[in-house]
Structures are given as structure tokens and as C-alpha cells.
Image: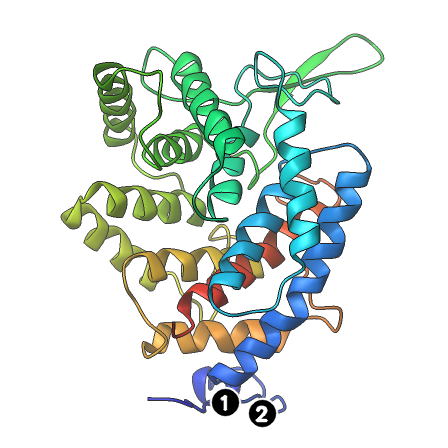
Amino acid sequence: MFPMIFTIAALAPNIPAAPEIPIDVAHVRESVEKSLPYLDKGGLEWETKKCVSCHHGPWMMWSGYEAKKRGFTVNEKSLDAVRAGSLKAYTHPKLKPTSRDVLTELSINVIYLTFGLGAAGEPDAETTKFFDRAAAHLIEQQKEDGSWKVIIKKTTPQGVTTTFLMAPLIDSDDVTTAWALLALSYREPAGISKEALAKSKKKGLKFLSDNPPADTLQSLVVRIMLYKRLGKADEVKDLVTQLLALQKDDGGWSQTKKLGSDAMGTGQALVALATVGVTAKDPAVTKAWGYLLKNQKSDGSWVVVSRAYEPPEFSSYMGTAWATLGMVQTLPK
């Protein structure tokens, strides 16, 4: 039943009154139309730097191709350029980006590129080859306990080497493991026996079973997406209940319980809800739309503070892509 008109004050009566913002399909589409040029521009800028990054390219493609499926006008020339650059950059035998010296064993970007490239539709031969190599890389890098880990090393001028995460891009081991399993479940790869693939998934799922979700929203979101794909209805139901309970009075979600709502958490929550079939008719979705509409900047982006003290352009770009994905996927088809 559209349009659905609410106000921020009605959705969150304890928040001081703000100018009324119509929360309906038309205004959500306008919001997406504002965010897509921002994502297009940022993705191309990183591509011209010869850096197929974890925090720009995959998210530009994923959000752009998904928007195209819902009838939005996208810059296909830009998407094709980033797609071609991504495939070219990952020709290294160990699937490391050819233009960068990455100090990690697991190439986390192959996971994100699986979804970014996959959103384009039926893959061509070159993309199919990448998917197969990515799956083989993931199986090769799986740890004995069934997990996948990304350890980034940094050495100071004094010669001291430390390891660190770059959340939410690189999060806790349970999040990385869920992402890897989701990528391995995306399609059936060639060159890997069904037995080896099944064994890898079984080990990974046991690790997730033995290690409850971390205290982050992303841990819930990726598990919901994974378990839905694997048909684990009971697990999905429990996790969705937990997810809905975390929605804040302002309509948004936060990345962690200690933080306030932001576009990253809100977009991820919307994607998870869309994955399990929650539609725009649900109050949780319209409240989340209201939060995003109220907090979008004039350039189409949302400000997201990094949990890893990295430059905010990384987290804000990813957050804007997730917000765009969340709105696109909860819009009526």
C-alpha cells in the first residue's frame, strides 16, 4: 500500500521535532538517485589510482548493478571500467592485487568482488574464471579450525611489527568466516570437487556454531544472509529477532552497541531483512528509510565514522554503498 507517509517525529517521539520528511517510495528512490553519482565518482577515482580496493570497487559494483535491476539509471561505462580493472588486477597466481603489496595471506577482496561482480548478472568466461580461482583461494586459506582470518601486519620505523583489523571492512574471525562461506555458496565453482567443497563448508559452519556471533551488527547480518542461503530456517528466525531488537528509536542501526546509528549499520540491516523477505510494508523498514532520508548529505553520501580509525572516506563510502543497497533491495520490485 503506497505511498506510505510518516514523519520522523511520529517514528521517534522522544527525539526533538525536526522538519517533516515524507517517507515513501518516491523519496527513497530520489535518495538512491542522489547516492549513485557519489558512488560512481568515488569508485572511478580509486580505479584511476590503480588500486582495486576492498572499500570502493566491489561496493560500487554491487550497489550499482543492484540499482540497475530495479530500474535506476546507472553509469554503465563506469561500472564496466571498474569491473574490467578488477579482473585485470587479480591475475596474480595468489590472487593478490597486482598493483599493491598486501601483507595478508587471505585476499579478502576476492570475497567482496564475488558479490560486486556477481551482481552484474550471468558472468562471462573471464568473470567465471575469477569466481573459480576465488573459491579455490578461499579453500586453500581456510584454517584448520574451519575459520578464515585476515591478519594485517604493519611495521613501524623502529622495526616493531603489529597486527590489526580494519573494521568493518576486516572484522572479527567469525565475520570473515561467514563472508567466506557465503562466497563459497554463491555458485558451484569448477575445478573443486564436491567433496572438498562440502568439507570446507562443514568445517566453516562448525566454527560458526562453536563461536557465537560477535558483539557487532555485521556478525548478525552476514550470518542471516548465509543461513538463509543454506536454508537454515530456525537459525535465521532467531537472528532476525535479535536484529530487529537492535533497531534504535531513530530508526537506524549501529555497528556496535556502543555507537550511534549510522548508514553502514542501517544499510546492512535492511539488506539482511530484504534477504529474508521483509518488505517496505514492514514498520522496521519504513523507520530505517526515515533515518536514512533524514541523514543523507547534499552530495548523496552519508557520514560513517570508522571503527578502525582509518580515513573517514573509506567508511563513509562503504556506508553509503550499504545504505544504497538497503534502500534498493527493500523497494518494491
Quadrant into which the C terminus falls: bottom left
**Label ID, residue 263:** none
Q: Nearer the viewer, residue 114 or 223?
A: 114
x then y, percent, for residue 246: 38, 60
* Pointers 1 and 2 in contact (C-beta within 8 Å): yes
Question: Quick check: 166 above or below 24?
Answer: above
Q: Is residue 170 left or right of residue 219?
A: right
Residue at the top extreme, as displayed: 159
Drawn side of residue 282 relative to residue 319, left or right:
left
Q: Quadrant of residue 90?
A: top right
Residue 177 falls left or right of residue 54 = left
Residue 245 position by quadrant: bottom left
In the rendered image of this protein, does residue 86 appear above or below residue 237? above
Query: Does the rendering let one see residue 251?
Result: yes
Q: Is residue 304 visible?
A: no
Q: Residue at x 67, y 26 (%)?
A: 89
At 32% from the left and 18% from the top, the residue drawn is 146
Near-viewer residue (11 or 296): 296
Query: What is the quadrant of the N terminus in the image?
Result: bottom left
Badge 1: residue crowd in 10 Å (few <14, some 14–19, many ≥20)? some
Residue 317: x and y in percent read 67, 52
Helix, strand or loop for disc 2: loop
* Farthest left residue in view: 234
Q: Nearer the viewer, residue 206 or 18?
A: 206
The first of marks 1 and 2 along the sequence is: 1
Checking the image for residue 7, the label placed there is 1
Residue kind at label 2, given as amino acid type: Glu
As drawn, is 103 to the left or to the right of 120?
Answer: right
From the image, tell me which residue sits under label 2.
20
Q: Position of residue 33 (x, y in %)?
A: 63, 72
Q: Which secondary structure, mark 1?
A: loop
